[in-house]
Amino acid sequence: MSFFDDFIVLASLAGIGVAIAAAPLGCFVVWRRMAYFGDATAHAAILGVALALTFQTSILGGVLVMALLMAGTISALSGRGYAMDTLLGVLAHSALALGLVAVSFLKGVRVDLMAYLFGDILAVSLADVAIVWSGALLILILLWWRWSSLLTATLNPELARASGISPQREQMIMTLALAIVVAVAIKVVGVLLITAMLLIPAATARTFSSSPERMAVMASLVGSLSVIGGLFASFRLDTPTGPTIVATGTAMFIGASLTAMLNSRGR
């Protein structure tokens, strides 16, 4: 068996690619308190899958279009009398429900809903790995290019405006990046776990980070370790791989939180 025929190697490469893309972006999700925004964008992916299968087009393209439409809808409706958490909660669950209903109407099309909901990382191909890493590279370039502006708009919108930075434009860049993450990660971890891959590594890294840049790097490292540890645990324990990866990340978060608590008491 050649190197690239080994499904564990392909799964590791795909998972690390998702972690490297999602973790730095997850830092902005944590700083902006946009967890529900990530949920809504991810849940819209199921509707994108249904539409792509209906019109026999690329699933990646369908997911990306629906994720962008959902993000655009949220941006358009925000600030119009709705509490943001309520609006995001309604849209997130409505999109998931509509997607599942739409899939049920597809006749003669075999759809593995569990793979789309929880991912099927062990079934990724070399082409899937290439797509994931292309998306990850695109997101990293986007974040490197806009890092200072995104950070300023996130931490102090008034300062951003005074510096000639449009918070709305930076929000749209975030929206685009989230949609790309959802599109490339759906086969690896599924729509129900994408938000966990955004939030948990970032929340874990936040405990020990003294700067935004260090938090982004540490989040990528935590996400990658979660993938490798989760794959190994899944193989040894015969458990679902996607949820096991998230559970491994959760264990790292709990460990980091307990360590920080003990350190603060020690002082």
Image (cartoon, grey):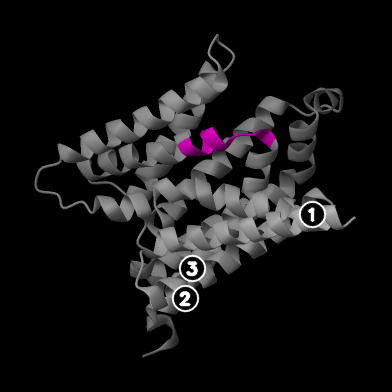
In the picture of the structure, the residue carrying the numbered disc 1 is 209
**What's the distance in space between the residues labelled 3 and 2, CA to CA?**
5 Å
Q: Could you tell me if the residues under marks 1 and 3 are in contact, i.e. CB atoms within 8 Å? A: no
**What's the distance in space between the residues labelled 2 and 1, CA to CA?**
27 Å
Q: Could you tell me if the residues under marks 3 and 2 are in contact, i.e. CB atoms within 8 Å? A: yes
SS at circle 1: loop
SS at circle 2: helix
- The answer to which quarter of the image holds residue 1 is bottom left
Query: Is residue 138 within the magenta segment?
Result: no
Which mark, residue 232? 2
**Of the pair 52 and 227, the residue shown nearer to us:** 227
Report whether 105 appears left or right of 215: left
**Of the pair 152 and 219, the residue shown nearer to us:** 219
- The answer to which quarter of the image holds residue 148 is top right
**Of the pair 12 and 161, the residue shown nearer to us:** 12
Seen in the picture, residue 113 relative to 163 is either above or below; the reply is below
Q: Residue 92, how many percent across, how many down?
A: 42, 31
Q: Residue at x 70, y 38 (%)?
A: 31
Amino acid type at mark 3: Gly
Amino acid type at mark 2: Phe
Q: Which residues are magenta?
A: 32-39
In the picture of the structure, the residue carrying the numbered disc 3 is 230
Query: Is residue 37 within the magenta segment?
Result: yes
Spot the residue most to the top.
Answer: 81
The residue carrying pointer 2 sits among few (fewer than 14), some (14 to 19) or many (20 or more) residues within 10 Å by Cα, namely some
Instruction: Looking at the image, tell me whether mark 1 or mark 3 is earlier in sequence order.
Output: 1
